[in-house]
Image: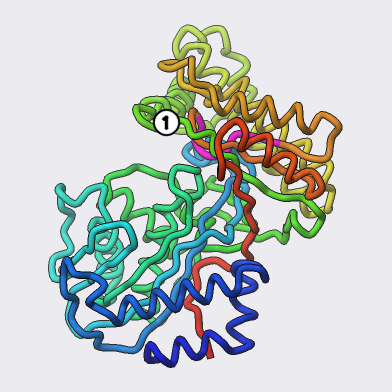
Amino acid sequence: MTGQELINNLNTPEATELLSTLYGGDEVEPAKQRYYRLVEELMQDSLFPRQKFPELDGELRVFSVPGRTELGGNHTDHNRGKVLAASIHLDVAAVVAPRQDKLVFFRSAGHCDVRVDLSDLSSREEEKGGIEALVRGVAAEFAAQGVPVGGFTINVDSRVLIGSGLSSSAAVEVLLAKIFDNLFSGGKKSALELAKIGQKAENLYFGKPCGLMDQTACASGGVVAIDFADLLNPQVRNIHFDPASIGIALCIIDTKGSHSDLTPDYAAIPEEMKAVAAFFGKTVLRELEETAFFARLADLRKAAGDRAVLRALHFFDENRRVDSMLAALEDKAMDKFLTLVNESGDSSLQLLQNIYSTKNPAEQGLGLALALTKSFLKQGGGACRVHGGGFAGTIQAYIPFDKLEDYRELMEGIFGKGALTVLRVRPLGAIDLVFQ
């Protein structure tokens, strides 16, 4: 449809219902204004003086991909473990116009305009770490599958908080995969197929090794339990769970810790877990029987070190805990689920040891936020755990609505205004929004 038709259709009852599903009823009007702006900016080259973009060749399409929050399974996916995750209302939205050539023009507020020529799909060292690498990498995977990819012009707006463990980069990868699929491949790929394409682009072109959890959760929508025992065909199971429906706010708290210099800390976790597996001739911990692990603990300590042993214990416990969390949600046993959330947090603190970096022991924002939350919730009714990779960044908390504003005042008094964000679980994953 044309830009004006799209703007008009945003005011239909059907569009209002869809936007309410994606963002919540109180966010419908702000969402409409956001999409108005994306359309208008795409059609007005004067707003982008750095580079004049050619006139649009095709009808406009609208896409949205959510960020995700991890609910259980902290640092298990890289050893082929189990995770529980949910897509959220904070998303990456885009308005797209197909082109007749092989050029992709990518616009995103706050970033430089990007131009990618898809006539060459080889990986480029100078593009690693940039959006060009993701565009080229996703296009290359479709081309490898026999899809004749073309170009498009895209205007993007991301509301997925950066550095908060909400998978902003995975959401962009899945967005690109969804766009290429819908424009050039019939739009038939499953959420898991889109996730795999995004992961390959990040691994091979962007230059960052990653598992498949983030992309799968972003693409799928709602709450998903993922079992990575078979990496080529992970088992994905959808579960209905909305904490807001039972009076609980799902929150993340940004402790404003620095993420600089943490790469060795993150890398050490899978390395140490795999070192334990290697001691037994295995590749990852999922292949290792716990009985064999415990039978040789004395020798293992000498070979891999105590921290590696403790992190392996976390993996085994957390894998079982994901199964228990899933069962609790299916049984609607919220008290049991919250107890397991707390246990996951305690395991990350005591066994996984990803609450602060040993290089900077004076900075322990995550530990402080967890301690304050536990004290706040000492009469029960909520839970908390580390969120994402750990060492710095965010914690996750389940707070009863009647305590939310007091909790916000506490957290923002310590970590600054805006530190607390309430997340909504979004039931829809990567979608092509059709406004009629």
Residue appearing at x 37%, y 61% in the figure: 197
Left or right relative to 196: residue 97: left
Left or right relative to 303: residue 69: right
Q: Classify residue 281 by image quadrant.
A: top left
On the image, the x and y values in percent for residue 357 come to 46, 21
Q: What segment carries the magenta color? A: 384-390
On the image, the x and y values in percent for residue 382 come to 78, 40
Q: Secondary structure at mark 1?
A: loop
| Residue annotated with mark 1 | 258
Colour option used = rainbow
User: Which quarter of the figure is the N terminus placed in?
Assistant: bottom left
Residue appearing at x 58%, y 58% in the figure: 88
Q: Is residue 348 above or below residue 150?
A: above
Q: Classify residue 56 by image quadrant.
A: bottom left
* 214, 409: nearer the viewer: 409
Left or right relative to 253: residue 5: left
Q: Classify residue 321 by image quadrant.
A: top right
